[in-house]
Image: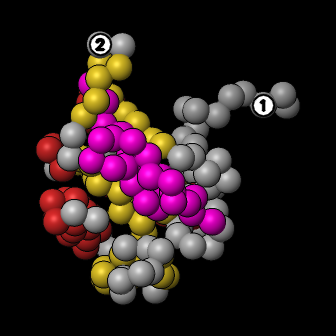
Amino acid sequence: MSHSTARISLAGEYLAASYMLRYCDSVIMAPSGHRADLILDHQGQLYRVQVKTTNSTYSRRNKDFYRWEMRSGGRTSRNTRQNKMVRYGDGQIDFFCLVALPINKVIFVPMNEDNLTEYSKTIGTLNKIDSKESLLETLLYVNKTPKLESLNDVTKSNI
């Protein structure tokens, strides 16, 4: 990993840790070589968090996107995939924290059975996501807590 790539990664991890500390009990930097970047302690429960950071956008169909690789490894300086990219497996991490450094945006995505290899959002869509809400929804998903529906959202029953 080049020096500038390491700085971008570390900046993303610190921004993610700073954000999570606003709502959770503590955040610990994971040891080097660990599959997770951060260990989050929230109400006595530990979570393994993999931080993915991007520092640039790409254009597709006249729209600008932020994109994150959801595998370990990364892209080379020529923006080609490295051969040793590995998907995260079950039990290695609990969720991803996606960081867009240019806009200081942090969002959270649970690790799930879809096991995506790439995640992207347009700048407009990303700006509309509430970071706190995405953290809450991710923690609820990881803990398998059902989402609450208001009475207005519930359809009439056939009583």
Q: Secondary structure at mark 1?
A: loop
Give, as a three-letter code, the residue at label 2: Asn
As rendered, which of 134 and 36 lies closer to the eye? 36
Residue at position x 39%, y 54% from top? 74
Question: Left or right: 88 with respect to 24?
Answer: right
Mark 2 vs mark 1: give the one in front: 2
Which percent across, then down, holds residue 24? 32, 74
Answer whether residue 41 is magenta in the image.
no
Name the residue that disc number 1 marks. Answer: 157
Which percent across, then down, holds residue 31? 36, 86
Answer whether residue 88 is magenta in the image.
yes
Residue at position x 24%, y 34% from top? 57
Is the magenta region chiefly helix, strand or loop? Answer: loop
Does the rendering let one see residue 107? Answer: no
Name the residue that disc number 2 marks. Answer: 62
Give, as a three-letter code, the residue at label 1: Ser
What are the residue bounds of the magenta stretch? Answer: 64-89
Would you call the spot at circle 2 few (<14 residues within 10 Å), some (14-19), or many (20 or more)?
few
